[in-house]
Image (tube, helix red, strand yellow):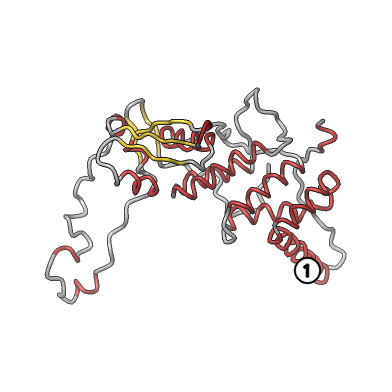
Amino acid sequence: MADSFNDEVIEDAPPATATTTTADDVEMGEGAGAGASAAGAAAAEGDNTNGEDLPFAEGGPDDPPAPRVTFAQYLSTPIVTLLIGSGEAETLLTAHQGLLVQSPYFAEACAEFADDGSIELPGEDLDAMGCFLEFLYTGDYFPKKVPGQRTLEKDPSIPDVDMTGDQLLKHAKVYTLAEKFGLVLLKNLASSKIHCVNSTAKGEIAYARYVYAFTSKDDSSIRVPVANFWATRSHTLRSEAEDEFRALCLEYPQFGYDVLTRVLDEKLKRERNERMHPGAPGSARKRPRHSSAAAA
């Protein structure tokens, strides 16, 4: 999905989980600190009898900030073992607890053991977990976005056109993993990378099937662009993957309903515009598409 149809998607949100400054001088943190509470009304009437109700209960506004945690300090925290997959496919990864606990999911898991420990993740994708850990340590994951462009870094091992949907699925799996682990910045980053991938109709079908299988019905940030994409291009793309498109609609009726709703909404909008501006030329947004037959 090399073009985005959801203006609400955050394209270039800078990941605050790992903002690198020098090799061992990095600030970490998934969220920002909470602001002072609004207790001014009670204070004005003299109802405050203890300092904890004041806007600056712990001191004045000019107090120095808390000491910053350096990257070296994160690396001095206990090592946590992560068991990814199960059976013969099980893979052992390790990470520093100080970084893992930036995720609410792992903060809760790590709180259950006093020192070094292990966490089993039998149902997680190994590549997605690798991207998750790469993000924790560096603030991004490969392939990175090219600054100022809607493209990703080139890799000779990755084809320019995603014929199978593997590239779309890579970022979609990072997206759902970030949702599970509670990392909003990683979730937004993965979403923005999805819209940098050029793929075929069959690739888009594989991606849409994953989205409707593993995301919430209320997750409009990823579902709306998928439905919009097919609503505006289904008449040209079905010839490349008509059987797959029909199977997807039958497997996930919500997908078919979402696409149909947007087709009808666009039809009503077009008719309304024609009544308001008779004779005005129409317009359409286009983005490069790659035919499966041509790419083959």
Q: Which SS class for mark 1? A: helix
In the foreground, 122 or 235: 122
Q: Is residue 91 above or below residue 106?
A: above
Q: Is residue 62 above or below residue 116?
A: below
Which quarter of the figure has residue 276? bottom right
Q: Is residue 200 visible?
A: yes
* Image coords of residue 213 (percent x, y): 62, 52
Position of the N terminus, as image quadrant, is top right
Task: Check disc 1: other Cα within 10 Å, few if <14, some if 14-19, many if 20+.
Answer: few
The x, y position of residue 253, in whole percent, is 71, 61
Q: Farthest residue in the left direction?
A: 49
63 sits to left or right of 98: left
Q: What residue is shown at x 44% (from left), y 30% (from top)?
A: 92
Q: Which residue is mark 1?
A: 268
The image quadrant where one finds the C terminus is top right
* Residue drawn at point x = 51 percent, y = 43 percent: 123
- In x, y percent, where is residue 259? 73, 59
Q: Residue at x 54, y 45 (%)?
A: 175
- Place of residue 162 in the rendered image (x, y in percent of width and height, measured from the top left): 71, 35
Camera-side residue: 166 or 86?
86
Q: Residue furthest front?
A: 87
The amino acid type, in three-letter code, at marker 1 is: Leu
The reply to whether residue 30 is visible in this rendering is no
Residue drawn 74% across the image and 35% down it: 163
Compare residues 257 and 38 and report the one nearer the observer.
257
